[in-house]
Amino acid sequence: MASYYVNDNAQANGDHEVHRDGCSYMPSVANRTYLGEHAACDTAVAAARKRYRQSNGCFYCSRPCHTG
Ligand SMILES: [Zn+2]
């Protein structure tokens, strides 16, 4: 299990990126929301979509859940 966070600031394309704890691209504490402990990025992204409809896995730390 790992801690996952969603970026409260959208990317240029409108995506809110989901990151696993320890990612180099983790947003600062002020700009992220904790999503809980997840075994994989798919459930973390599902949790993020309850908050931000347009959520997407980070290309670097959650590539299986990254689209587009
Ligand atoms: Zn990441």
Image (spheres, rainbow, N blue to C red):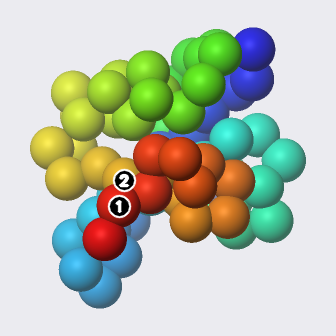
The residue identified by callout 2 is 56
Q: Please, is residue 9 above or below residue 29 in the view? A: below
Q: Residue furthest front?
A: 64
Please indicate whether residue 30 sits to the left or right of residue 8 in the image: right
Name the image quarter holding residue 8. bottom left
Question: Measuring 44% from the left and 57% from the top, which residue is drawn there?
Answer: 66
Question: Measuring 21% from the left and 27% from the top, which residue is drawn there?
Answer: 50
Q: Which mark is residue 67?
A: 1
Please indicate whether residue 15 sits to the left or right of residue 44 in the image: left
Q: Give the residue type at disc 2.
A: Asn
Q: Quadrant of the N terminus?
A: top right
Q: Give the residue type at disc 1.
A: Thr
Residue 19: give x, y in percent of width and height: 60, 48
Question: Measuring 22% from the left and 71% from the top, which residue is drawn there?
Answer: 14
Q: Number of marks in the image?
A: 2
Name which of mark 2 and mark 1 comes first in the sequence: 2
